[in-house]
Image (cartoon, rainbow, N blue to C red):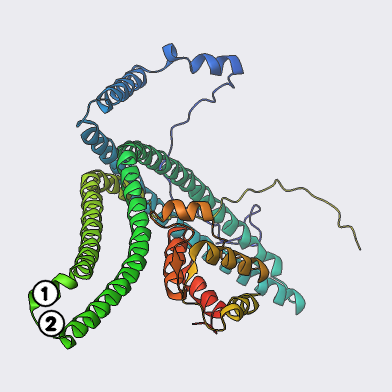
Amino acid sequence: MPPSPENPNNIPPVIPPEEKPKAEVPPTPPASEDQAKQDNKPENKGFFSRVSEKIESVRSSLYEGMYKIPGINKIVAKMEIAYNQVGINGNQEVAVQLKGQADSLSSRIQSLEKTKQDIITAAENLKNKGMPGSERILLKLQGLDSEKNDLLGKRDKIQSKFEAKQNRIKEYTGARDAVAGRLIESYNKKLEPINAAVETLRKDKEQLGFTGAVMEVRHQQKNEEIAGFEAHRAEIEEGLRAAGITSDSEIKFYTKELTDAITQGRAEIKKDKEAFEKEQKRIDSAIAQKTEEGNPYRDAREEFVRVTHMRPIDVRMEKRTIGEPYEQTESASSSGSEGQNNEINQESGKKPERLPVGVAIEEWNKLLKTKNEKTIPAIDSKEFFTLAKGVTKDFGVNLKEFKTLIGSYYKLKGVDSRKFETYYRSAFSKLL
């Protein structure tokens, strides 16, 4: 083809992709702000738009009324959740498709960029070698830029659609979670009195555990007393037989008071244990009953909690490129325990058998203060004797029994048992 005046270098023209001819639309005159407000008035909207808004308003009012009907609210909530979930799923599918189209366009744009760089490199090589034709090669860049701009325009439109879908997904997700949250809150309110009752019962069980520890110490001392009675009775029986009294009835007559004391002591221990076990079973049964009463509400609540965990998939697109118009500018250059226990021992010259629990608590608190122990709180004597029913300040305890009592007290107060055990052994290692 001979060169023409318009194309002296005979460079083949870049043919843009074929597009369907579009009918010419006369330009719309710019509307004033008042006119825009006028167009947005409800009376000026389209008929179908007004009808759609009325239907949505009626639907919302209907749902709000049905939420107040017991037994129906759960069904209504499931209907609304299903409706919003359909909206989420549908918009997600479209968003994924749009993301695929945008990625395809981005790939083509990157390919054009690579071709463009290759052309620039070739032109620079020709220019560096002093050979003609570099400008002719650079003319091809205009065609590539035109094709790239066309692809960028298409990607911008796809991105606008994608962002709209993402906004719709957020709207549907928010509406779905709001419905689920409303039901979750409803079930939380129903569970509040049940959970409060269970918590009270658990505290009663903890108090009972402390009472059991006190009872255990009392029974241990009672058994020691009974063992003493039995030993004394055996001595009396042996003396009577040595004196020639061999009749069982006569021996029982002389040892009747001791036998009655032994029987009564064992009966008291048995009675205490039976009462303790009965109360323990009552509390456990009440906890189980209340827990079972709340389970249907918990199951229903968890059903809606799981709904809120169904998050939309994370679909992301490259950030929109915001360009600036080209401007021609000129380049410019710019350029205490052991001592206290020893005092107690020195008075008697041996390890004390038992110490009044009131004195033991005072010594324990002094020990904590001397050692500046902050992880274990001091014992509140008034609270301790209020909780330890039947135990007075003069109630005698040895080290093992004292450990049982204050160990249960600290357990009730929520103190880590390992810290208490380590400190207790450290404090009384020489006496244990």
Q: Quadrant of residue 125?
A: bottom right
Left or right: residue 346 versus residue 47 is right
Residue 250: numbered disc: 1
Q: CA distance from mark 1 to mark 2?
A: 7 Å
Left or right: residue 231 versus residue 112 is left
Q: Along the line of sight, which residue is nearer the eye, 431 or 171?
A: 431
Q: Quadrant of residue 262?
A: bottom left
**Which residue is depicted at the point 25% across and 45% down?**
294
Residue 342: numbered disc: none
Position of residue 225 relative to residue 283, above or below, is below
**Residue 179's x, y, as percent?**
34, 36
Q: Residues within 10 Å of mark 2 (few under 14, many from 20)?
A: some
Left or right: residue 232 versus residue 140 is left
Q: Along the line of sight, which residue is nearer the eye, 110 or 369?
A: 369
Position of residue 75 relative to residue 307, above or below, is above
Q: Are marks 1 and 2 in contact (CB under 8 Å)?
A: yes
Q: Residues within 10 Å of mark 1 (few under 14, many from 20)?
A: few
Position of residue 334 relative to residue 202, above or below, is below
